[in-house]
Amino acid sequence: MKQYSGQVISEGTVLAKVFIGETITPNIEKMNVKDITNEETRLDEACLEVMSFLHKSIKRAKQEQIAEGIGIIDTHIALLSDDSKQSLPHRAKQLIHEETCNAEYALETVAGRMVDEFDAISKSGYLSARGEDILHIKNMLINTLLGVTLGCEIAEPAIIYSDRLSPEQLTSFDPKLIKGIVTAKGSALSHTAIIARNMNIPFLTGIKIDAGSVHPDMIGIIDSESNTFILDPDETTVHSYNIKMRENEEKALLIKEKAKELVGSCKVALYANIGRPCEVADAISNCAAGIGLFRSEFLFLDAKETVDEQSQYEAYKEVINAMDGKPVIVRTIDIGADKEAKCIKLPKESNPALGTRGIRISFANPDVFRTQLRALLRAAYCSNLKIMFPMISSLWEVKKVIEEVDYVAAMLKEEGIDYAKPPIGIMVETPAAVMILDDIAPYIDFVSIGTNDLTQYALGIDRTNENLSDYYDVRHKAVLELIRITVEKAHKHGISVGICGELGADIKLAKDFLKMGVDELSMPASKIPAMALALEGEVSVDSDILVPVDGYLIPMEEIPDAVFSKGLVGRCVGIYPENGIVTAPFDGVVTMIAKTKHAISIKSQNATEVLIHIGIDTVSMDGRGFEINVNEGDVVKAGSKLLTFDVDMIKDVGLSPIVIVVILPN
C-alpha cells in the first residue's frame, strides 16, 4: 500500500480500480528524413484523425450534457483547423522543410516555441490557457503519429490516472464510469478541472506515480478530506473506506432531503447556475429557489451559425416553465477571453481577458444582441424572467443597454408580438463597476457579483493562468471589501445583490455574506443542499424580519420540545437569550398574548405571522417573571418592545429560557 499527498481540485471520497488514462508522449528525437512530402502527408493524416477524435469528443459532451466541455473542445477544433501561417500544423510543416526533420520532432519543437511566445507576449492567463491548448493538441498529434489510439473506453467504474488529462480525454470516457481523477500535473483553474467540478468527479493533482507499477485490477482510493491518494490499499483500509463511503452516501441523501425543508426558509435565496436548458432538472432536484445565472452563451458555443430568435426563445421558455414561477436570471451572451464561438467572429487580441468580451461583444454585434433581446423580451411575457448584462464598467454602457431594450420592445409592440420588459441587472465584475454603482443603481433593478472576474481584475491576476494559481485568492481581503461596498451601495438604492461566481458556493464565507446583507447565492446545483444545511437556523420568510431577541441560534431539531423540533406548529428557530427583552420582528399587529404572558404573536401586512414563545414549559410559571408592554390589536413598529422576562428566574425554577420563534403557516 502506497499513500500520496496532492492538491484537491474537486472534493469527494471514492474507491475504485485504477485505469491509466493518457499515454505519456515519450522524448522525441530529431531524425533526418529524405522524403519531406511523406512527413507532410503523415502530419495531414494525423490532423484528420485528431480532428475526427475531437468531433467525437464534442458529440459525447453534447450527449452527456457537459456544457463546459463543449466550448473547450470547440476551441481545440478551431486551433487545429486554423489555416493561418501561425497555426501549429502550418509551422510544423515549415520546420520539416527547413530542417528536413520528422513530423514528431517538428511538432514538439514548434509547440514549445509557441508556448514560449505566449509567455513572452503577456502574462495573461488567457494566453497561458492557449499555450495549454497547444500542448494538448501537440500531444494528440504526436501520439497519433506514433500509432497510439486516441481516447480509451473503460468497461467498469474506475479512477483515471494520467500525467495530464486533457478535456477531450476526459469527455471520451463514459462519465457514469469515471469515479475519480488523479494527475501528476494540473491546476484548479485548468479546463479539465472546470469540467470535473461541474461533473462532481473527485479530483486530485500533483501526484506522481510510476504508471508501469499499476497493474490491472489494482484498487485506488481518493480522499479529498486528507488530500490523499492511496494505491493498492490493504483489506483493512478498503473495509474502512467502504464504510466511510456508505456513510457519505447516506449523509448526502439526508442532506438533500433536509434541504427540501431548509431552502425555502433560508435567509438568503439559494439559486442554481446553469449553461443549458437540460441542466434545469438538476437545479430542481437539488431544491434551487431559482436560476441565478443562465449562461446563455452556451447556446452559441457549438453553433456554426448565429442562433436564431425562435431557438433562443424556446430555450428560455423551457427553463422558465420548468422553474414554475421561480426567478430565472439570464445573462446575455458572454464570450471572449476563455470562451469562443464559431458563429461570432472575435478580433485577434494580445490580451483578450481585457479585450472584446461580455457586453462589448453584444455592442460590436448589434444584430446578434437585438435577436437575443427579442427572444428574452418575448420569454419575459407573463413570467419571472430577469435579464443580466455582463462586464459592465461604465454608466454609458448601462444607458445603451436600456436604449437597446426599449428599441427592441418598440419593434415587438409594432409587430403585435406579446412581450414584457423584465427587471434588468448588471454583473459587477470590475472594481470600476463597484466604484460607480451609485451612478448606475437608479437605472437597474439588481446586481450580481461575478467573483471570479472581480478577483482577477482587482488583483491583476488572470484566473486562467495556472502559473499564478498561488496568487489568485478569491478570499483576498480586497475582494471581500469590494463585495461589502457593492452590497452597501446597492441596498442604499433599494436593489438586491446576488453572488454567482465561485464564492457563491463557498460555505466558509456564506455567513459572512449574510452579515453583509447579500440577498442571493447562486452556485452549481449540486452544492445547494450542503449550503442549505450550513445555513440552517439563518431563517427568514420576510426580507424585513428582525431577530426579536439577542442571543445565539439553536437549530430547529435541537430545541428540547418535540412540538417545535418536529415542526408540528411551523418552521422555527431557537435563540438562547442574552437578555430578557423581546422586540417586534417587523411592522404589524399583535394578534395574541398568552394568559400566562409567556407567548405572543404578531402579523405583518403581507400576512406573515410569527409566534414568539419564551422558554420551554414556562406556562407553569403562570406569568411570574413576565411583563407585557403591548395589548392585543396594537399596531407596533419593528424593533419596539413587546415584553420582558426574567431569564434568571426561569433558570432558577429548572426550566430552559430558550426563545422559540415560529413562522406560522398561512
Image (cartoon, helix red, strand yellow):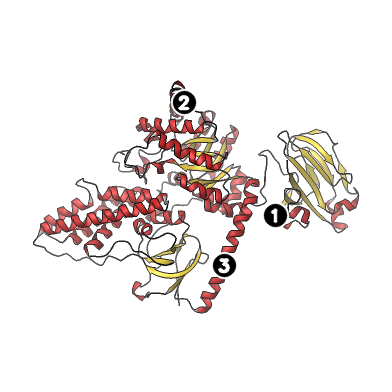
Label 2 to label 1: alpha-carbon separation: 51 Å
Q: Which mark is residue 555?
A: 1
Furthest residue to the top? 414
Mark 2 closeness class: few <14, some 14–19, many ≥20 residues within 10 Å: some
Residue 378 seen in the current view:
yes
**Residue 92: % across, % down:** 18, 54
Q: Quadrant of residue 42?
A: bottom left
Mark before the other along the chain sequence, 3 or 2? 3
Hey, what amino acid is under mark 1? Pro
Q: Is residue 540 left or right of residue 95?
A: right
In the picture of the structure, the residue carrying the numbered disc 3 is: 246
SS for callout 2: loop
Label 3 to label 1: alpha-carbon separation: 26 Å
**Residue 81: % across, % down:** 24, 48
Residue situated in front as seen by the camera: 97 or 328? 328
Residue in the picture at 56% in, 35% down: 490
Label 3 to label 2: alpha-carbon separation: 55 Å
In the picture of the structure, the residue carrying the numbered disc 2 is: 417
